[in-house]
Image: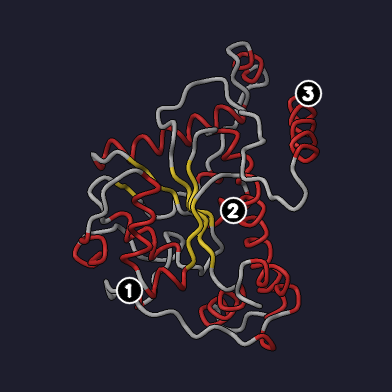
């Protein structure tokens, strides 16, 4: 029933949209039956190798923003171990999905309490694949869409994963960036380009602070002076660039002829091609 209602809502939003205008209003209905301890968390939606670890350590340096390592919330599952458990929980209005959302919310709240800050950010790239679920779980969530030239992302992955098949990597990255772009079309949020972040981190972090409603702090640019937790695989980027504590320049953008064909359309729509 909920899925049918959601589909009708999406169709109605599509029908009412003026020609040529892309909606940025939320059309997904909430999928929750309990209040959240963290009603408005922030999610960075990006591909892997798109600079999300750099963005998170810059934000985590702020006195009011807690941006921990990748949390991988979607891997935290609730599994009843008795046949009757789901019926018992359903009587409380709690589906298995909602129980998982409560668990995810509790993890975010735990981080906020531990840090003593007021805003929590999750930057796990895999969130780009489950943005619909995140939006339904937290109708008041905020989003930062982090873009990077798709072919640069592919090149970065190939450099990191020696011996990887280029076609397989292109397919993988296309999945991530498609998720990011779909989220941009349905959710309100702030779009930041990795290339702009590395070229002028002061300007971009100011934009982010304005969006989150906090004062910009110049200390954000000197992230190397603070402890940001584990810098290792699965937790985020662990490259020498991140460990240096300094914002490094982005690699030169690929030329048009170097872009894999499946990535051309979205590369153009993101403004990287004329």
Earlier residue among tags 1 and 2: 2
Q: Secondary structure at mark 2?
A: helix
Q: Tell me: 151 left or right of 68.
A: right
Q: CA distance from mark 1 to mark 2?
A: 24 Å
* Image location (x, y in percent) of residue 66: 32, 47
* Image location (x, y in percent) of residue 197: 40, 68
Q: In percent of the image, x 36 and y 34: which residue is there? A: 109
* Image location (x, y in percent) of residue 45: 53, 54
Relative to 154, does residue 35 appear above or below in the rendering?
A: above
Q: Secondary structure at mark 1?
A: loop
Is there any visible trace of residue 172 in the rendered image? Answer: no
In the picture of the structure, the residue carrying the numbered disc 2 is 128
- Nearer-the-camera pick, 112 or 192: 192
Q: In percent of the image, x 71 and y 80: which residue is there? A: 260
CA neighbours of label 2 inside 10 A, class few (<14), some (14 to 19), many (20+): many
Relative to 17, does residue 90 appear above or below in the rendering?
A: above
- Nearer-the-camera pick, 66 or 157: 66
Q: CA distance from mark 3 to mark 2?
A: 25 Å
* Quarter the C terminus occupies: bottom right
Numbered disc in front, either 3 or 1: 1
In the picture of the structure, the residue carrying the numbered disc 3 is 1
CA neighbours of label 1 inside 10 A, class few (<14), some (14 to 19), many (20+): many
- Nearer-the-camera pick, 272 or 169: 272
Quadrant location of residue 256? bottom right
CA neighbours of label 3 inside 10 A, class few (<14), some (14 to 19), many (20+): few
Q: Tell me: 124 left or right of 79.
A: left
Can you tell which mark lies on residue 247?
Answer: 1
Quadrant location of residue 266? bottom right
Q: In percent of the image, x 36 and y 71: which residue is there? A: 200
Q: CA distance from mark 3 to mark 1?
A: 49 Å
Can you tell which mark lies on residue 186?
Answer: none
């Amino acid at each position: 029933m909920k899925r049918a209602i959601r589909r009708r809502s999406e169709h109605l939003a599509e029908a009412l949209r003026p020609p040529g205008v892309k909606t940025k209003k939320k059309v997904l209905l909430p999928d929750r039956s309990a209040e959240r301890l963290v009603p408005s968390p922030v999610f960075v939606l990006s591909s892997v190798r798109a600079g999300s670890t750099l963005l998170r350590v810059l934000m985590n340096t702020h006195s009011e923003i807690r941006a921990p390592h990748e949390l991988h919330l979607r891997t935290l599952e609730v599994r009843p171990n008795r046949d009757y458990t789901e019926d018992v929980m359903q009587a409380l209005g709690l589906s298995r999905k909602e129980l998982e959302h409560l668990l995810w919310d509790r993890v975010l709240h735990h981080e906020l309490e531990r840090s003593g800050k007021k805003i929590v950010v999750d930057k796990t790239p895999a969130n780009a694949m489950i943005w619909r679920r995140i939006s339904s779980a937290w109708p008041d969530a905020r989003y930062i869409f982090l873009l990077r030239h798709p072919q640069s992302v592919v090149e970065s992955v190939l450099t990191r994963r020696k011996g990887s098949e280029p076609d397989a990597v292109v397919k993988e990255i296309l999945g991530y960036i498609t998720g990011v772009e779909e989220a941009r079309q349905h959710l309100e949020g702030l779009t930041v380009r990795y290339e702009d972040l590395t070229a002028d981190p002061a300007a971009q972090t100011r934009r982010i602070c304005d969006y989150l409603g906090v004062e910009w702090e110049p200390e954000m640019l000197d992230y190397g002076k603070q402890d940001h937790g584990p810098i290792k695989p699965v937790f985020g980027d662990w490259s020498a660039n991140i460990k240096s504590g300094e914002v490094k320049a982005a690699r030169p953008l690929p030329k048009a002829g170097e872009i894999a064909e499946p990535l051309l359309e979205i590369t153009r729509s993101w403004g990287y091609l004329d």
